[in-house]
Amino acid sequence: MDLADQLSRGLAEIKSGKAWNAATGTFSTQKLKMDWTKPVAVAWQKRLMQKEKQDFCTYEESMGEDKSWLESA
């Protein structure tokens, strides 16, 4: 199942109304099936890692061959 499918499952679960308590005006995830969140979280972590790698490569390219900045860290 791809990420869009997982997000659709999550939205459907929220729209089901199982989590909303009209009497108290609160929302609780305890009654929801939350298994769709794991693939979303994994995809988000991969995205963050890619961004960090890209930022590092950009920084490294801007510093050129001079690695003296590494020694001062």
Image: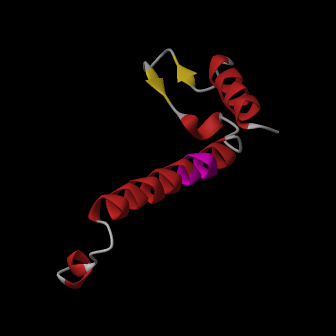
Q: What stretch is highlighted in magenta?
A: 41-46
Q: Is the magenta stretch mostly helix, strand or loop?
A: helix
Instruction: Name which quarter of the figure residue 26 lies in.
Output: top left
The quarter of the rendered structure image containing the C terminus is bottom left
- The image shows residue 34, relative to residue 61, as above or below, that is above
Q: Does the magenta stretch include residue 7?
A: no
Horizontal side of residue 19 vs 51, given as left or right: right
- The image shows residue 2, relative to residue 68, as above or below, that is above
The quarter of the rendered structure image containing the N terminus is top right
Q: Which residue lies furthest to the right in this view?
A: 1
Q: Depth check: 62 or 37 in front?
A: 62
Q: Which colour scheme is used?
A: secondary structure
Q: Depth check: 37 or 17 in front?
A: 37
Horizontal side of residue 9 vs 71, given as left or right: right
Which residue is pictured at 71% across the width and 29% down the height? 4
Which residue is pictured at 67% across the width and 30% down the height? 7
- The image shows residue 36, relative to residue 52, as above or below, that is above
Which residue is pictured at 48% across the width and 16% down the height? 23
Instruction: Name which quarter of the figure residue 10 lies in.
Output: top right
Q: Position of residue 72 (x, y in %)?
A: 17, 81
Q: Depth check: 71 or 18 in front?
A: 71
Q: Position of residue 25 (x, y in %)?
A: 43, 18
